[in-house]
């Protein structure tokens, strides 16, 4: 309330976009999502003055309309619908539509106009764009396909923006306005979120079950990488088990299943691999190489090395030194 008891107008969430409402239309943004290529044609904020109309027209691409403020109406095909703040509707491909602001009240609109192109021939498995299909997750492919199929089947009528797709417009615009690092990625993610949240606004979209990990193999790979990154440190079964939140006994069992050996044997193998390389490439002393690679003493390295490789570190160096 102001000093006269009147209600204070609530701030407009998209006020920032009014400064340069069409700025992002100048950006040439194309990206891949699953097996689809997406090109942004328009991504802007526009305002309809009271009574303004846009006569019947259609697009061969998808155009998403959101009403962040005001009211009016839209005719989709032959059916008129009232529009109010918080609504969204989809026109296209090839949906004939007419738009009109209320006679006494302006209507604002957020518009995303995109072209979606299939990058694969159905059933062929051949990639038509970049040959980089092996970098695209099968789960991303499935999600993108499910979303696009849903978009193609959505009923031609407005609904409420229940999942706040409109926020994505502001996220992308703010990234552009503030010259944030990763602008392209923010725009890409914002567009994908608009597509996903639009389908959710119309219906509960079934999601494919994501695969469950083989936890033993997953933990083994975590530990394997951790050891490779930290082999020069005094690693123990207990400290490494704690890193992957399992018991030392479980970790020992995982190593037996994956290497037919023990945790200690695996660490020795990693360390010896590095030591053999250093013995053949540099002039460090055996003592220096031992301490550098996690052995407590040169004598212990001598014992392990001869047991595993049948010769001493010095003998190995003499046979493999590189000039």
Image: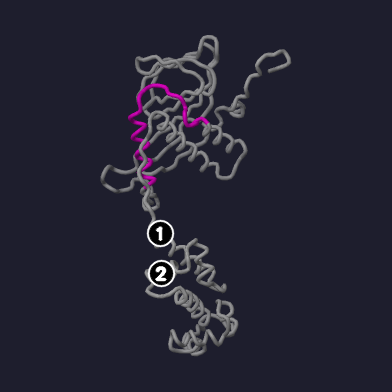
Of label 2 and label 1, which has the lower sequence position?
Answer: 1
User: Is 78 left, or right, of 114 in this rendering?
Assistant: left
Of tags 2 and 1, which is closer to the observer? 2
Q: Residue 253 — which label?
A: 2
Span highlighted in magenta in the image? 139-166
Q: CA distance from mark 2 to mark 1?
A: 13 Å
Q: Secondary structure at mark 1?
A: helix
User: In front: 72, or 26?
Assistant: 72
The colour mode here is one colour
Left or right of 148, for residue 225: right
Residue shown at 47% from the left, 27% from the top: 161
Local crowd at mark 2 within 10 Å, few (<14), some, or many (≥20)?
Answer: some
Q: Quadrant of residue 76?
A: top left
Q: Is residue 185 above or below residue 80?
A: below
Determine which quarter of the picture holds residue 282: bottom right
Q: Is residue 250 above or below residue 299?
A: above
Q: Is residue 41 visible?
A: yes
Please check the rendered image and state whether residue 249 is part of the magenta-colored stretch, yes or no: no
Q: Residue furthest right?
A: 3
Left or right position of 260 against 281:
left
Please rate how many residues cluster around mark 1, counting C-alpha atoms within 10 Å: few if below 14, some from 14 to 19, many from 20. Answer: few
The residue at 43%/32% (across/down) is 114
Are circles 2 and 1 on residues that touch, CB within 8 Å?
A: no
40 and 105: which is toward the camera: 105
Quadrant housing residue 206: top left
Q: How many marks?
A: 2
Disc number placed over residue 249 in the picture, else none = none
Task: Based on the picture, tell me whether residue 153 belongs to the magenta stretch.
Answer: yes
Q: Badge 1 is on which residue?
A: 215
């Amino acid at each position: 309330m102001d000093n006269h008891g009147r209600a204070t107008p609530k701030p407009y969430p998209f006020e920032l976009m009014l400064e340069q409402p069409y700025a992002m239309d100048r950006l040439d943004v194309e990206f891949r999502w699953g097996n689809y290529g997406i090109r942004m044609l328009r991504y802007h904020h526009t305002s309809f003055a009271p009574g303004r109309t846009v006569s019947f027209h259609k697009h061969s691409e998808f155009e998403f309309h959101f009403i962040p403020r005001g009211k009016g109406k839209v005719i989709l095909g032959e059916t008129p619908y009232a529009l109010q703040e918080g609504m969204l509707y989809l026109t296209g491909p090839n949906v004939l539509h007419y738009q009109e602001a209320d006679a006494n009240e302006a209507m604002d609109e957020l518009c995303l106009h995109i072209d979606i192109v299939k990058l694969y021939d159905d059933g062929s498995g051949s990639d038509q764009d970049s040959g980089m299909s092996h970098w695209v997750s099968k789960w991303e492919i499935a999600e993108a396909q499910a979303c696009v199929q849903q978009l193609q089947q959505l009923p031609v009528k407005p609904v409420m923006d229940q999942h706040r797709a409109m926020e994505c417009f502001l996220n992308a615009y703010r990234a552009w306005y503030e010259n944030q690092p990763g602008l392209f990625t923010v725009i890409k993610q914002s567009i994908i979120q608009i597509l996903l949240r639009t389908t959710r606004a119309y219906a509960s979209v079934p999601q494919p079950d994501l695969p469950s990990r083989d936890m033993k193999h997953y933990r083994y790979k975590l530990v394997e990488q951790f050891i490779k990154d930290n082999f020069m440190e005094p690693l123990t079964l207990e400290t490494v088990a704690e890193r992957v939140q399992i018991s030392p006994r479980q970790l020992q069992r995982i190593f037996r299943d994956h290497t037919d050996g023990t945790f200690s044997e695996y660490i020795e193998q990693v360390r010896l691999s590095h030591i053999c390389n250093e013995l053949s490439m540099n002039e460090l002393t055996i003592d220096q190489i031992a301490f550098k690679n996690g052995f407590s003493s040169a004598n212990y390295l001598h014992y392990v090395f001869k047991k595993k490789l049948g010769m001493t570190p010095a003998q190995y160096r003499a046979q493999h030194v590189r000039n």
